[in-house]
Amino acid sequence: MLGSAVVVFRETLEAALIVAIVMGASRGVAARGRWITGGVVLGIVGALIVAAFAGAISEAVQGRGQELFNAGVLLVAVAMLAWHNVWMSSHARKHVAEMRHLGHDVSVGVKPMSAMLAVTALAVLREGAETVLFLYGLMATGGSAGLALGGILGLVGGTAIGVLLYFGLLRVPLRHFFTVTGVIVLLLAAGLAASAAGFLVQAGLLPALVNQVWDTSGMLDVGSLAGRMLHVLVGYNDRPTGIELLFYVVTLVTILTLMRIFGARSTRTARAQAAKEGAPA
Amino acid sequence: MQIRKWILSLVLALPMSAYAQLPHFSLSIKNHRFEPSEITVPAGERFRLVIDNQDPTPEEFESRSLRVEKVIPGGSKGSVTVGPLKPGAYQFVGEFHESSAKGTLHAK
């Protein structure tokens, strides 16, 4: 029972933390619950499909299908998170002002929420597919009620930590809220890009550059609960390769630069607008 | 179109041919155990580790020190690129049956 609880917990934790971040980052958006639930449902359906075709995916592209698939899913999620942050950098101020002014959720349009739906679906899909395969294996060898209970416990435990993270985030004052979620989304995206690089090295498509830049596994093992959480939240890795570090830094700098460019442009537009209306900027 | 196809095949062919030339080392999984459970590989070289899952159920081959993580469906083979490694011992497990599926890779 404990074995199945641990495996399901690990897989659920990563998806739950990502969903919590997405929920936080889309705070104040009308109907975000529906968007994110939609993402979770799509992710579960996708996980079942991926698990059903796991053999075919593994054998594709000279046995590197699984790595390419994982890297692809991760990089699409990175692009969506980047786009969301860039969008927020030019809309966050208006968003908070509207939330304050109206005292209720605002509509931000379909585009940023469809990006967040995709991030949710991809996170659930990737972690869910492994959980489905694991549970399938247990059932095929005669699953017991204990194993099923363990699976449920793992699912509940992982989800609970996601819920805790979300309510923790809500304690951040609204004034700083989107700055905080923006930083978390940025680090999450950089960490996912590094993981994608890891899969491409495993597939033999990228060189590791440096096989181990540092080893902090004695200090904080990435397999421990704290290590796993930091791995998702900030991309912590106890034994990163050079290429993973490179992907991390390049993603971080690219997203930050785009945020600066689009953030500055929106400030200029706002000033121009204010000047035209004869109000002091 | 023609040029694009040509470039694509070149881009794909380069890593593919390098991939085929890497030395291979094999492991199998049977009754949720690795066979052999100890394997020796040369240090300082990249290689492919081929895992033949002879069980009917899927297994996740995982090693944080080797930095690999791969689901291997029942009755199929999967391979991962590893290294170059420093001399030493590297633990690996079958994450789905961690109590029995354990092994060590020695890089010498």
Image: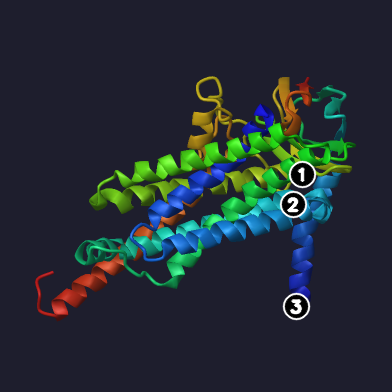
Marks 2 and 1, how far apart in space?
Answer: 9 Å
Q: Earlier in the sequence, mark 2 or mark 1?
A: 2
Image quadrant in which the N terminus of chain A is located: top right
- Considering every residue shown, the one lying at the far front of the view is A145
Horizontal and vertical percent position of residue A224: 55, 27
Of labels 2 and 3, the one closer to you = 2
Q: Nearer the viewer, residue B40 or A72?
A: A72
At 77% from the left and 31% from the top, the residue drawn is B45
Which mark's residue is nearer the viewer, 3 or 1? Answer: 1
Q: Position of residue A112 (x, y in %)?
A: 43, 66
The vertical placement of B56 against A256, above or below, is above
Residue A211: in sight, yes or no?
no
User: Chain under label 3?
Assistant: B
Residue type (three-letter) at the residue carrying disc 1: Tyr
Residue, disc 1 = A136
Q: Residues within 10 Å of mark 2 (few under 14, many from 20)?
A: many
Who's the residue at 49% across and 66% down the image?
A: A114
Tag 1 subunit: A
Q: Are marks 2 and 3 on the same chain?
A: no
Q: Disc 2 residue type?
A: Ala
- Say which residue label 3 marks: B1
Tell me how far mark 3 sits from mark 1, CA to CA.
Answer: 45 Å
